[in-house]
Amino acid sequence: MEFKEAKNKFVQTWGALGSQWGINKTMAQIHALLMVSNEAVSMEDIMEELQISRGNASMNIRALMDWGIVYKEYKAGERREFFTAEKDLDELAVKISKERSKREIKPALKVLKEVSSISANTTSEEKHFVDQTKKLYDFVLKADNVLDKITEYKDNWLAQILMKFMK
């Protein structure tokens, strides 16, 4: 397999994986392209490589920048904008985990807390509903707390030792 074919296969596969994880396919493809590029890539090169419109590229790059995993770079003498992705895989995992928690888990916790707080004194169905949603809230909260602790490990020397031990 030649380099160009391998690169394309990686970008396409990463895009497909991204859509399975609830991320826009094009967003995942742009991220993949930037992640494996050894230099910052211009918007025009991203558009050409992925065969996407300027609007699509711009919208998805902005989303990746909002996640904190893509950065704008400036090159002296260039009017074009260039972009690069976070290369540190540990840092990438931490940023994605934090963002997914903020966008998905925290809102779900809010809803679970709200629906499990209703007064359920009338029927066994209501009592069962409250019991199950409280259990689900407790479980998701514990999982989110574990995720928070794991993503904070970079600042915690004990957690770093434990992570090295687990590898």
Image (cartoon, grey):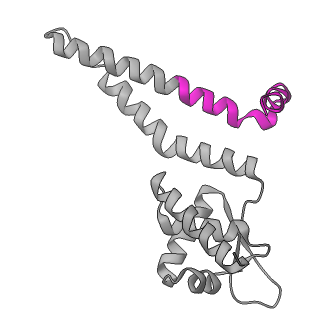
Question: Left or right: 159 with respect to 123?
Answer: right
Q: Main secondary structure of the magenta part?
A: helix
* Quarter of the rendering containing residue 125: top left
Q: Is residue 12 depicted above or below 99 in this figure?
A: below
Q: Quadrant of the N terminus?
A: bottom right
Which residue is painted at 50% across and 62% down in the image?
Answer: 16
The magenta-colored residue range is 142-167
Residue 126 position, x and y percent, is 19, 16
Q: Where's residue 75, x and y in %?
A: 80, 82
Q: Which residue is more in the foreground, 116 or 4? A: 4
Going 50% across and 72% down the picture, which residue do you hit? 59
**Nearer the observer, 55 or 32:** 32
- Let me know if residue 154 is in the magenta part: yes
Quarter of the view holding residue 49: bottom right
- Would you say 50 lies left or right of 110 here? right
The C terminus sits in image quarter: top right
Residue at 73% x, 60% y: name it: 86
Q: Is residue 54 visible?
A: yes
Looking at the picture, how far across and down is residue 74, in whole percent? 77, 79
Q: Can you give x and y, in whole percent of width and height, for residue 70 in the image?
A: 67, 64
